[in-house]
Amino acid sequence: MERVAIIGASMTQFGQREGWIRELLAEAGIACLEDAGVDADELDHLYVSNMASGEFEGQTGVVNALVHDLDAMPAYTQRVDQTSSSGGAGIYAAWQSIASGASELTLLVGGEKMTHRTTGEATDVIASLTHPAEYKHGVTLPSFAGLTARHYLERFDAPRESLAKVAVKNHRNGVDNPNAQFRKEVDLETVLESPIVADPLRLYDFCPITDGSAALLFCPESVAREYADEYVVIAGIDGATDTHVVHERDDPTIMGGVVESGEGAYEMSGYGPSDVDVAELHDMFTILEFLQMEGLGFAEQGEAWELVEDGKTDRDGEFPINTSGGLKSKGHPLGASGVAQGVEIYEQLVGEAGPRQVDAEVGLCCNVGGFGNCVITTIMEAAR
Amino acid sequence: MTMEAYRYEDGSISYPGHPRGPGGTEPVETIDLSEHTAEVITWTESTATPPGVREPNTLAIVEFDLGEAGSSDGDETVRAIGQVTTDEIETGEAVRPVHVDELREPGAGIREPESQDWDGYRFEPI
């Protein structure tokens, strides 16, 4: 099986953007091709990670629009929807296209346009992924986070402040990300006194609603040097699922999809948790950073909060998490987020992360869809 | 008006029901959870609610113990999620299901009103 390299990366400014989905996708796609010095007509496959352009904007067929806007015909196209993990699923699809030999050059562009909707409307579009037995009660993704956070804090006797420290850390990291939606530090008091959204979680425990797009370019490692001096290799990747109905899980603090996809990615790569130098985790809500740290083996169950309290996940700590600012500060344009995680790890591994740069040879992305319903874990290594 | 859980061939129970159960087996009977009490596992008060949903919306995950004391089925538990009748709720509290004709306003949100039912059970502290 061919090893797969990433030879180009880009992301647009995340935040409240004037452009619509077509324009956002094209902006990131063109920038990625230019980053790698590749012409669009060289593409064999073009994938678009997008959750809900039809529901948000009334624009379907976004991948057909993009292939035309890039003038990449007759490239094969496919839209990848796996809710919030559409971006990670797009990385998996792109990896499969190259590893299988079906494509010699695959462009992945993830994007979402959301901010023209009210918070209630956007929350409802996302909540529509829930089971009817959940949806009719008005269950939302933030409410799942509140339910889980309370259980975690009570069961493991973790201080409420430890969740707030995730927000403080990721906002601090986001200050140095020029494309982040929020480039502003917040202090502990601000987080703990912000309005309640889903008790015990407050406004600053949640990511914002965001417009934006990100892209990655893939090819076989055997030809990567033809395109780029510096590149990264996908050492391991796997995807997995957990129950659609969240309360049916045996343990509310374990996301089976995180555990399973992590184990698959570790096995494929030959790496273990202690080999990972930097990670981008899906901090849609602060509690999710704890659950992924534990599910991926970076901490024992019920102990992730201690690493955050000790500063070990800070950018200058032993194990930096979410150097990009995470979804929390960078923003969460659904279909783009998993791709943007990949962009951050790519930049870290090729030494292009600027003031966010950490010393890293191996990086990991974990992209979570629904409330752990579907998960993709990707491990990348710097080319040697 | 029932709060219907499924029991499957292997004895496992789920709410809501599915065509295949946790062990991959077929459902063999239904159990009306509305006749049972439950214990609150966790809860939240959600203030950022979508269109057609009450605000605030207090929700709980509860656990029903369907086993009869002294029987071999004493460890039969099943969980459910739902609205709570009050915002005064605590983990570990006992609740009972109370039927409500309309839990949220059908058609106010994105989901097609005809695609599902909208009545159900809220949990009331005992």
Image (cartoon, coloured by chain):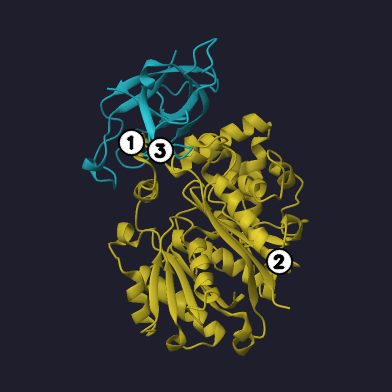
Chain colours: A yellow, B cyan
| Amino acid at pointer 3 | Val
Q: Is residue A279 visible?
A: no
Query: Could you give the CA–CA distance between mark 1 and mark 2, rounded to whole angstroms?
Result: 43 Å
Q: Which residue position holds label 1? A: A136
Q: Which residue position holds label 3? A: A139
* Secondary structure at numbered mark 2: strand
| Amino acid at pointer 2 | Val
| Amino acid at pointer 1 | Lys
A298 to the left or right of A370 = right
**Disc nearer the start of the sequence (1/2):** 1
Q: Would you place residue A258 above or below residue B42 in this image?
A: below
| Residue A377, horizontal then vertical, whole percent | 59, 58
Q: Residue at x 27, y 62 (%)?
A: A58
A173 to the left or right of A99 = right
Q: Residue at x 55, y 10 (%)?
A: B70
* Secondary structure at numbered mark 3: loop
User: Residue A242 shows which numbered tag?
Assistant: none
| Residue A221, horizontal then vertical, whole percent | 62, 80
Query: Could you give the CA–CA distance between mark 1 and mark 3, rounded to whole angstroms?
Result: 7 Å
Q: Would you place residue A363 above or below residue A118 in this image?
A: below
**Disc nearer the start of the sequence (3/2):** 3
B98 to the left or right of A3 = left
